[in-house]
C-alpha cells in the first residue's frame, strides 16, 4: 500500500504549521535549487509529481506556463491546493504518483519536489516519466540525499556533551530500500537509494543527465535559520536535472 | 608544485610491498570495476593517466589493444613499468599528468585509476581529456569517493571501546579542496570534490555521463580480505564512465 502520511491528522496539523511558519529547509535550499534548474516556464506544459498544496503549480502559472497538472496522494493537500492555488489552467489530481496513468498527454517539463524518496519502485517511475515527456523535455527532481537516508538507525548528527555537532554518522550506504523514521509521527517510510542508482536508472531509461545539484542555503536562509550552515557539512538534498533523448 | 609521493623512498618501499602482497583494495574493488566499464579494448588506442607500474597497460595489450600511452609522475614507477611491463606498443612517459601535452594524438579510451584525487585542477584535466579523445571515445576514471575525502580531520570509522566500527564520520562535504593525510608518510595531499562537481565538470565540457559505479568487493575479495565487507557501509571509490559527444 502506498503511504499517505499527509492525511494522518497529527502529521497534517504539524506539517501545515511548519510550512505556514515560512522558514523551512524547502524554502531556502530545495525550492530555490529546483527552480533554478528550469530553463523556462513560458508556454510550457508541466506535470508536478507530488504537488502538495499547489504553491509550485501557481508559481508556474505566474511565470507564464501554459498548463500544469499537479498530482498528490493526499486529499488534505489537494483540497487546500484547490482552495488556495486555484487557476483555470491548473488541474489537480488526487492519486498516488505510482497509480498515475496519463494517456495522450505529453509534457515539456516534469517536476518532482521531495517525493521520489517515498516511491518504492523508482525504475517504474522513471520509465513512466520518460513516456510522459515530449522529446527534449526536462525531468527535474529533488530527493533526500543518499548521505542522509543511508543509515538505518535514523540518520543523525553525533554530538558532544555540550550539544555541539561533531560529525554526521553514515552507514549502510549500499543497502538500498526501506527506512523508517519518526517525523511528527512514527513509521514514516522513505526509500534509500545510492547516487549510482539515482543516476544510472535515468540514463538506462532514455534520459540524459544534465546536472546534479547538492544545494546549500540561499543567503537569506542563513540569516533567518542559522542552523542551515550545517548544510555545508553534509547536504540534505540532491537535485537531478535530465532531458529526454532528442 | 605537483606532489610526487611515489618517489619518496619510505612511501615507495611501503607501497611496493603493499601491492606485492596481492591483497589490496585495488585488486578486489577498484580494478574489477574500472575494467568492467570498458566496452572493448580490441584494436583501441588507450591513454592511461597515472599508469603506475604498467599492469593495466599490459592488461590492455593482452586484451587486444593497438597501443597504450602510460603517463606517471614517478620515476620509480615508470622504471619498474619499463622493466616489468615492457611491450613494443606501450609507450611510458614520466611526467605529471597536469603537464602532459599531446599534439596530433587522439585516443579511443582514456583511463585514470585513482589519480584524479591528486589533481588540483580537475576542470583543466577534463578539458584536456576531451581534446585527446576521438569522437565517441570513452573517459573512464576512478577516484576516492567524496564520502571518504570530505572530512578534514582525516576520514575514519568511529569505533566503540571493543574496536567495533559504529559508523563512518562525515563532515565538511561542501568545502572542496586540499586534504592532507598520513599514508605511510605525513602530508599526502588529496583533493576533495563533491559528487556534483565530479559529474557536472564532465558534462559542462562536452562529455556525456554514461554510468556511475560505487563498487563493492568482488566475492573473492570478501573471502581473502574480510574487512572489505565494510565497503557496504560506505564506498571507498567512485567510478565515472563518460563519452565524448558524438
Image (cartoon, coloured by chain):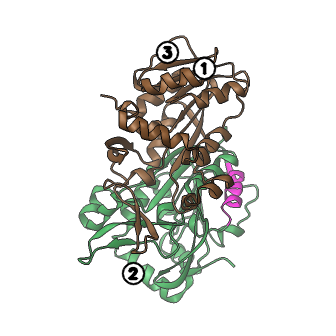
Chain colours: A green, B brown
Element type at mark 3: loop
Magenta stretch containing residue B110, yes or no? no
Location of the N terminus of chain B by quadrant is: top left
- Residue A58's tag is none
First of labels 3, 1 by sequence position: 1
Q: Which residue is mark 1?
A: B86
- Residue A17's tag is 2
Q: Residues under labels 1 and 2: Cα distance? A: 70 Å
Q: Determine the residue positioned at 71% across, 60% down.
A: A124
Packing grade of label 2 (10 A; few <14, some 14-19, many >=20) is few
Q: Determine the residue positioned at 48% across, 49% down.
A: B145
Packing grade of label 1 (10 A; few <14, some 14-19, many >=20) is some
**The numbered mark 2 sits on a residue in which chain?**
A
The chief SS type of the magenta part is: helix
Q: Quick check: do tags 3 and 1 share a chain?
A: yes
Element type at mark 2: helix
Residue closest to the eye, A64 or A222: A222
Please provide the residue range marked out in magenta: A121-133
Q: Quick check: do tags 2 and 3 share a chain?
A: no
Amino acid at each position: 500500500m502506498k503511504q499517505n502520511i499527509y492525511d494522518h491528522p497529527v502529521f497534517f496539523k504539524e506539517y501545515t504549521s511548519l510550512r505556514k511558519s515560512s522558514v523551512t529547509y524547502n524554502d531556502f535550499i530545495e525550492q530555490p535549487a529546483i527552480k533554478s534548474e528550469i530553463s523556462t516556464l513560458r508556454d510550457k506544459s508541466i506535470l508536478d509529481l507530488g504537488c502538495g498544496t499547489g504553491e509550485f503549480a501557481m508559481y508556474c502559472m505566474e511565470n507564464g506556463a501554459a498548463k500544469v497538472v499537479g498530482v498528490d496522494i493526499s486529499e488534505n493537500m489537494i483540497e487546500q491546493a484547490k482552495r488556495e492555488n486555484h487557476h483555470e489552467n491548473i488541474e489537480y489530481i488526487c492519486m498516488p504518483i505510482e497509480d498515475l496513468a496519463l494517456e495522450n498527454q505529453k509534457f515539456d517539463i516534469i517536476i518532482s519536489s521531495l517525493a521520489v524518496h517515498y516511491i518504492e519502485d523508482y525504475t517504474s517511475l522513471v520509465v513512466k516519466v520518460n513516456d510522459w515527456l515530449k522529446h527534449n523535455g526536462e525531468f527535474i527532481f529533488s530527493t533526500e540525499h543518499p548521505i542522509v537516508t543511508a543509515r538505518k538507525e535514523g540518520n543523525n548528527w553525533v554530538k558532544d556533551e555540550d550539544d555541539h555537532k561533531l560529525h554526521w554518522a553514515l552507514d549502510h550506504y549500499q543497502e538500498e530500500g526501506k527506512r523508517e523514521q519518526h517525523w511528527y509521527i512514527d513509521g514514516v517510510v522513505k526509500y534509500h537509494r545510492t547516487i549510482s542508482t539515482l543516476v544510472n536508472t535515468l540514463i538506462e531509461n532514455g534520459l540524459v543527465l544534465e546536472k546534479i545539484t547538492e544545494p546549500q542555503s540561499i543567503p537569506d536562509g542563513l540569516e533567518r535559520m542559522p542552523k542551515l550552515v550545517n548544510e555545508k557539512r553534509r547536504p540534505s538534498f540532491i537535485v537531478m536535472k535530465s532531458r529526454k533523448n532528442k
